[in-house]
Amino acid sequence: MDTITRNKTIKLIGINEAEIRTSISDLIDNENVNIEIKPFDAKTYIILTASADSEEAAKDLIKPVSKDIKKRFGNYIYSTKEKISLEMSVVNLLEKNELTISTAESCTGGLLAGRIINVPGVSDVYKEGFITYTNKSKRKTLGVNKSTLKKYGAVSMQTAKEMAFGAALEADTDVSISVTGIAGPDGGTDEKPVGLVYIGVCIKDSVHVEEFRFSGDRANVREQTVVSALGLARKCILEHFS
């Protein structure tokens, strides 16, 4: 009798491959279910594969392992469905909590806004996006203080904070995401190398900012920034509303 092979993908954000591998090391040698950990960009997929005499039997082998993994990783998991992307999961959270969102971007130049806008029906939650590539536009559009830019620079935690707050204020949204960084290939220094990015999330006048250091070429840095921005927004929304 031919065997039937089935798989299930568990999608995670905000936790790296090494941490995942350590957390499920006891499951890796499962005789019935093959576990593959696949990182790319700033996301990680855990792919479970099982073979059996029937589709139902293969699914039954996967179910307990999947349940165990879900319990271990909790909110790090943004989807277990093939068609649900990270941006969809963020939009779903916004809709669930009746929240609106705006974006303020520097090094990603609208890539983050475009990713969010790709989600059907997003007009109910996404209100406005700002591309503030220069210091002048950061000051004029978002109200970033000239003194902040002079003291800390455009790529800084302080600037990301003021960008996020300014976007939320200007667009009148419940949530805003800000991004400022050095995508390369030029512009890096010893103190602020290529790949240094600050991402801010403003929710109800409270701003959380995190520093990231990405590797790769310009396109890779920008893509990792977008993914991490969506992941951080999701994390902050869950902490505030779920």
Image: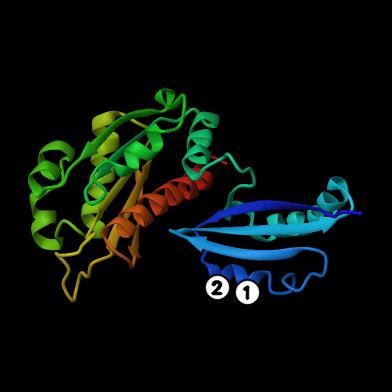
- Residue 111 image offset from top left, x and y in percent: 31, 43
**Residue at far bottom of view:** 190
Position of residue 27 in the picture relative to residue 95 (left or right): right
Q: Which mark is residue 18?
A: 2
Work out whether residue 91 or residue 108 is closer to the camera in this orientation and state it: 108
- Residue 190 image offset from top left, x and y in percent: 18, 76
Crowd class of label 1 (few under 14; some 14 to 19; many from 20; radius 10 Å): few
Secondary structure beneath dot 1 equals helix
Indicate the amino acid at tag 2.
Answer: Ala
Work out whether residue 103 or residue 113 is closer to the camera in this orientation and state it: 113
User: In this figure, which residue is indicated by the disc labeled 1?
Assistant: 22
Work out whether residue 81 or residue 167 is closer to the camera in this orientation and state it: 81
Task: Residue at 57%, 41% (x, y): give it.
Answer: 242
Q: Quarter of the image for the N terminus: give it.
A: bottom right
Position of residue 229 in the picture relative to residue 15 (left or right): left
Task: Residue at 37%, 29% (x, y): give it.
Answer: 126
Indicate the amino acid at tag 1.
Answer: Thr
Position of residue 161 in the picture relative to residue 228 (left or right): left
